[in-house]
Amino acid sequence: MTLRLDHLAVSALTLDEGAEHVEAVLGLPLAAGGKHPHMATHNRLLGLGDLYLEVIAADPEAPKPAWPRWFDLDRFSGLPRLTNWICACDDLELALSAAPDGTGEPVDLQRGDLRWRMAVPGNGILPFGGGFPALIQWQGAHPAPRLPDVGARLKILEIVNPAADEMRHFLNLKDERVRIVQGDAIALRAEITTPHGVRVLE
């Protein structure tokens, strides 16, 4: 099954801190997002044309869930940074059958009138040290067309991983913007074109 790049996630200790970081780097305002009660997280969003960027953090007003939060947020520390990439599919079970062990189990989720299914690892940690994409299947509307167009577009997403070759083996993703490269440390780097020029988010 062919996957599609769906969105990028910047993790932060607090939503305000994450939003301020992204807005400072890109020179663009984020739009309001919402809350994810099942995971006790909340986010803010930025449209990137056919995809989007979310800043996500634990919601201090929500009770901590009895299961690990997605994107390994329970163990997050340090400054806000680009931590995850998310790929969409048309059949989540089929996509999971071709994915590495630990990619997750399907969870039905909803925020307002947005409905989706997402593969969430039992321990909150995606394969390849968190470098493998989270898998999502939208059911109906997608957030990207609803977001204000502030002139931002993804130019390059670089995923650095010590097991890049093995990870590439599991991915049927045809997107010239995505580059999976070998490296000693796990890292994500996005080049984003803006009205102010190309900005780099890491």
Image (cartoon, rainbow, N blue to C red):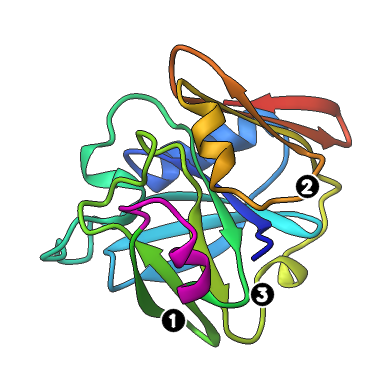
Mark 1 neighbour class, 10 Å CA radius: few under 14, some 14 to 19, many 20 or more: some
Q: Which mark is residue 110?
A: 1
Horizontal side of 34 relative to 37 (left or right) equals: right
Per the image, label 1 sits on a secondary structure element best described as strand
The answer to whether residue 88 is above or below residue 127 is below
**Along the viewing direction, whichever of 36 and 27 lies nearer the viewer:** 36
Segment tinted magenta in the rendering: 93-103
Examine the structure image and report whether residue 94 is included in the region drawn in magenta. yes
Q: State the image coordinates of residue 139 (x, y, percent, origin top left).
A: 58, 85
Q: Earlier in the sequence, mark 2 or mark 3?
A: 3
- The kind of residue tagged 3 is His
- Which residue is under mark 2? 175
Q: Quadrant of residue 195?
A: top right
Q: Which mark is residue 142?
A: 3
Residue located at (20% from left, 52% from top): 123
- The kind of residue tagged 2 is Asp
